[in-house]
Image: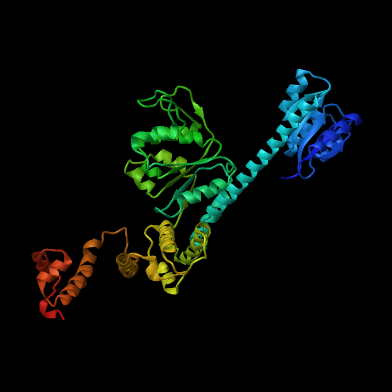
């Protein structure tokens, strides 16, 4: 058990002597001050846990010392002593943060109870602080957005500029790109970072429950409301509220949300008194909100209110260079989580990870590696251990090839003129496809139609329209 250190401050030598002997018998280390100036200095002694200070001393009174301790952040539990047992002194001492108040002449039994409570209070406070610090370290370790690509670095720069400012942030990105993770990073680096981080997912909560989920409800507001409940907005007071998948929110509820954000107050469902809340708002979505506004699915005024600053998170397929970095990060993390030696990737496994398109983005990469680490007994993960969907890889690779061929042509096309591009391009796509399948079936049109998944008559018509002749089939 750690050694307790106490400060005793009084200009009466006999009081100092009695208190010193009393505390030493309890194995408490003692430092002494005979005036307020010395007491102020000693209050910042390393490891000081408690202080017993007289209210009347030369240099500075006990209440002045107490006030100074509060302003300077001293963690010591302070007991104030006085020969004047007046209510005014008691109230003033407690208001300034005194742990307790003892009147002279004091009973050593009562003082011992005060000291024991003060020691336990400091120990508990230290324990909670240590737990909080460890939790913050753990959250900071888990709240990491990994990437060195220019697209990610540009996002980091923007976050650095806006995190400490009181501005709403709209995060755009596909599912799995790390929108909630980015919101947490903004929260942790903002003035609200010590407050709560509360997320509500508009896509995960049924529409009929969404209003009470965000704003809470009063007892008796509806059948089954046997007691009141705070909503996510209220729980986020003093912190950050993440409105995830905001694009899925009901239009009627959007109007109420807009008023709550603007006025920083709202009514619970069934409530008659306004609830005032000061919370930073971050919204996230994988939808095109401008298109949703055009289609009347999203309020234009709410969009303007939310996109004080817009962050666009790139999909993983657009930052392939980050895939090996992310893989190394996840392998490090899984080694800590699951214990045992850290696993590595074979060259072919790394190559496959880089070539895969990752429709599920970073979340999919994390899940693929977690499964491989858990199921593979070897320390080196092979391509087969990753269990990537081969058919999807082939389809994505084919799409990339076609896109690469089409892109230069599309870029030369004037989008302002009528091109009938679809009708123009489709024969160039269909003709080689049908010819290759006919070659595969050696000109058998029945088999070719089955492979293509079309009717034989449709195949014959397309062959005629595309000028494909059986005699030309190799």
Residue 460 in the image: x percent, y percent?
9, 68
Q: In this view, does 287 lie to the left or right of 55?
A: left
Residue 145 in the image: x percent, y percent?
51, 56
170 vs 83, nearest the viewer: 83
- Examine the rendered structure and indicate whether residue 215 appears above or below residue 220: below
Query: Which residue is situated farthest in the top direction here?
Result: 86
Query: Which residue is situated farthest in the left direction here?
Result: 457
Answer whether residue 146 is visible to the viewer in this image.
yes
Residue 348 in the image: x percent, y percent?
41, 73
Which quadrant does the N terminus fall into?
top right
Answer whether residue 59 is visible to the viewer in this image.
no
The answer to which image quadrant residue 404 occupies is bottom left
- Examine the rendered structure and indicate whether residue 183 appears above or below residue 332: above
Residue 435 in the image: x percent, y percent?
17, 74
446 vs 346, nearest the viewer: 346
Q: Is residue 204 left or right of residue 11?
A: left
Query: Which residue is situated farthest in the front direction here?
Result: 25
């Amino acid at each position: 058990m750690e050694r307790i250190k106490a400060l005793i401050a009084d200009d009466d030598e006999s009081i100092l002597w009695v208190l010193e002997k009393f505390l030493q018998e309890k194995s408490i280390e003692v430092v002494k001050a005979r005036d307020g100036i010395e007491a102020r200095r000693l209050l910042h002694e390393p490891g000081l846990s408690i202080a017993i200070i007289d209210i009347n001393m030369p240099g500075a009174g006990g209440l002045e010392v107490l006030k100074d301790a509060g302003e300077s952040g001293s963690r010591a539990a302070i007991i104030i002593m006085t020969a004047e047992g007046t209510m005014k002194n008691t109230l003033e001492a407690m208001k300034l943060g005194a742990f307790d108040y003892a009147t002279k002449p004091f009973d050593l039994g009562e003082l011992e109870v005060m000291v024991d409570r003060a020691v336990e209070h400091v120990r508990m406070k230290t324990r909670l602080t240590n737990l909080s610090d460890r939790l913050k370290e753990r959250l900071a370790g888990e709240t990491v957005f990994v990437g060195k690509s220019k697209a990610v670095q540009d996002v980091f720069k923007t976050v650095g500029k806006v995190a400490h400012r009181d501005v709403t942030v709209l995060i755009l990105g596909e599912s799995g790109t790390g929108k909630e993770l980015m919101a947490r990073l903004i929260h942790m680096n903002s003035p609200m970072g010590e407050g709560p981080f509360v997320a509500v997912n508009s896509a995960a909560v049924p529409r009929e429950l969404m209003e009470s989920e965000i704003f809470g409800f009063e007892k008796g507001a509806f059948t089954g409301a046997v007691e009141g409940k705070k909503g996510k907005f209220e729980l986020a007071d003093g912190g950050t509220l993440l409105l995830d998948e905001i694009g899925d929110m009901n239009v009627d509820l959007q109007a109420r949300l807009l008023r709550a954000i603007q006025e920083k107050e709202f009514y619970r469902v069934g409530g008659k008194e306004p609830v005032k809340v000061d919370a930073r708002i971050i919204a996230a979505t994988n939808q095109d909100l401008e298109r949703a506004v055009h289609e009347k699915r999203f309020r234009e005024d709410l969009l303007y209110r939310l996109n004080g600053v817009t962050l666009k998170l790139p999909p993983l397929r657009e930052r392939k260079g980050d895939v090996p970095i992310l893989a190394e990060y996840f392998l490090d993390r899984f080694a800590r989580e699951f214990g045992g030696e850290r696993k590595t990737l074979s060259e072919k496994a790394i190559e496959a990870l880089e070539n895969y398109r990752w429709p599920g983005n970073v979340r999919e990469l994390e899940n693929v590696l977690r499964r491989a680490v858990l199921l593979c007994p070897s320390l080196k993960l092979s391509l087969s251990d990753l269990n990537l969907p081969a058919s999807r890889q082939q389809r994505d690779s084919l799409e990339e090839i076609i896109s690469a061929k089409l892109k230069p042509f599309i870029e030369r096309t004037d989008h302002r003129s009528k091109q009938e591009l679809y009708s123009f391009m489709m024969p160039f796509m269909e003709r080689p496809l049908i010819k290759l399948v006919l070659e595969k079936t050696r000109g058998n049109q029945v088999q070719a139609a089955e492979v293509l998944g079309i009717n034989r008559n449709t195949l014959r018509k397309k062959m005629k329209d595309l000028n494909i002749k059986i005699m030309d089939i190799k």
